[in-house]
Image (cartoon, rainbow, N blue to C red):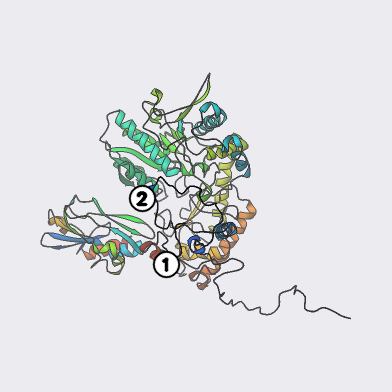
Amino acid sequence: MSMVNVGRPTRPEGSTTETRPATLTGGRGLLQDEALIFELGGWDKTGVDLPAPALDASDLGDLVRKDPIGLPGLSEPEAMRHFVRLSQKNHAIDLALYPLGSCTMKHNPRLNEKMARLPGFSDVHPLQPQSTVQGAIELMDRLAHWLKTLTGMPAVALSPKAGANGELCGLLAIHAAHDAKGDTARRVVLVPTSAHGTNPATAAFVGYSVREIAQTEDGRVDLKDLEAKLGPDVAAIMVTNPNTCGLFERDIMEISRLAHAAGAYFYCDGANFNAIVGRVRPGDLGVDAMHINLHKTFSTPHGGGGPGAGPVVLSEALAPFAPAPWVVSGADGYKLVEFEEAEAADAFGRMCAFHGQMGMYVRALSYMMSHGADGLKQVAEDAVLNANYIKARLQGVMSPAFPEGPCMHEALFDDSWLEGTGVTTLDFAKAMIDEGFHPMTMYFPLVVHGAMLIEPTETESKFELDRFCDALLALAGAAKGGDTERFKGAPFYAPLRRLDETRAARQPKLRWTSEPGANLAAE
Amino acid sequence: MRFTKDHEWVSVDGDVATVGITKYAADALGDVVFVEVPDAGKALSKGDSFAVVESVKAASDVYAPVAGEVVEGNAALSAAPETVNADPEGSGWFAKIRVADVADVDALMDRAAYDAYLASL
């Protein structure tokens, strides 16, 4: 019989050895080594051909630019491929579990995206007459209603554009409230040692000096230390609840009572609101101001997929000082009250040029309405259940920082279980990348040695949690079994090996500069 | 040389104290990538934050171990912050302070007491 024996091989042949030759170009498995877009494109090509301008007279005179503008020229497929290739080197919540503690990397439901793309919301302009965008303003009013109801607070400023911007808004309202009372000697803000770094940074930005509150052995605010540091010079305390150790501040009522008795306001960092939404109303805890990260608790995208949004709920005492604009409704429909209007006489100002992140408002309300009040309660319950499942599965091998009792929405481990292995928290995190899992938050909070903070969120199934825990337990076994090379050299399989963070910080390259003689003429 | 519980060291020559952070602190911080030192003339009360040290891991304030007035900040640290890791208790000094009361320095821990304090952490 005749047989063609030079066809396409259909099974692996040849070398089965595990050693891999380095590639010749730096590429790897269909992914090219990616240059900066400036290095990819010069002015010898362009994606768009424009006709030469018909007019040769210019009103600019001597102001016409003579230097090259330094922008790269790329064809459309080159530009598209560059960004798609970059995205393939990135991790995303749409690829896998993203267990960054304190970041709440939960799934962003596609329904939110569909709603945000409705033309009535996506094709409006902030300078349009308000009579033509009544639906959009009504949506802001509904969102405000949900946020006030869920937090038990009487007022909300929707406009802050992220968590830290919300902190700024809250402290400016507190500053304005003290000023209105003529109480201008309060120059200090108290912040626990486990706080997010943004808390002291915000206080310093507003002009306060920061004093730290000590932490108890079991990871909570030290009431005695708080009481000792409260005084007539303290403007506010900033406390996160649940805190960054993943623990509920069980003395929260006493904390707010002590703060108020000393004449200070209670700012609550609401970054972890997802652990208590639907179960606890911060207004009932004596909170005066709290930001709500829509991009955490209410599932709008983070970072590059963002932008973030950080509305701030305010107590009765702070409500008059809320920044403009806000929505009111009357016989003529909905209206944004602006800073220049008489109703906003006590407002401390405004946080941004317009009204904030409309697209995020749509997504957050879409999330709230699709879950309902009972669904949001289940969000908190499942977030806490998932974190405790991880804590329970790992605690026989890894060491929980606070072993007593359950945690809230995130499980915190220290590095005492790695002692004697020669493996550090950083090594362990890098080895996780090789196993296909994004690392947890490392070395935060600072109060826990070699901290590993794992926040699974409620959107991960038991199947996903088990895969994650299995991988961590396998790695932990390798670390304790003396397989240190797997850790010290990691990551082996990422697009780049371990980066020199120290050199990056000491000698940062903050902008690209062209090689001398490069073809970047202004044309 | 005298030491504080916040891991600053002080070395006095006449009424001028040289101040830095201890080897223990430098090791705990990890690779130092940025240092901000005070300008001459700045008046300090004991416990005032007078310098900032930043590593890859964290940013920390450095507190004045005694009251006085800054005579000189170690300008070399801004270009070479790694000196703090290489020689924390020598050329990695942060500032020289004209001390208001030299007796304040004597009240701080000596090397043996500081070592005992470190052992207790």
Q: Which amino acid type corresponds to the residue marked 2 in the rendered image? A: Asp
- The x, y position of residue A87, in whole percent, is 56, 57
Name, please, the residue furthest toward the top: A331
Quick check: can you spot residue A115?
yes
Amino acid carrying label 1: it is: Gly
The answer to which of A182 and A418 lies nearer the viewer is: A182
Q: Which residue is found at the position 62% from the left and 67% from the top?
A: A30
Marked residue chain, label 2: A
Mark 1 and mark 2: span between their CA atoms?
25 Å
Compared with residue A331, is residue B6 higher up or lower down, i.e. above or below? below
The answer to whether B8 appears left or right of A354 in the picture is left
B92 or A376: nearer the eye?
B92
Q: Which residue, given by chain and number where applicable, does mark 1 sit on?
A: A517
Report the quarter where the C terminus of chain B lies.
bottom left
Residue farthest along the right direction in this orientation: A1
- Same subunit, labels 1 and 2: the answer reads yes
Residue to which mark 2 is pinned: A62
Q: Can residue A251 be seen by looking at this rendering? A: no
Image quarter of residue A299: top right
Residue A505 at x, y percent in the picture:
38, 61
Q: Nearer the viewer, residue A22 or A494?
A: A22
Task: Tell us which disc is closer to us: 1 or 2.
Answer: 2
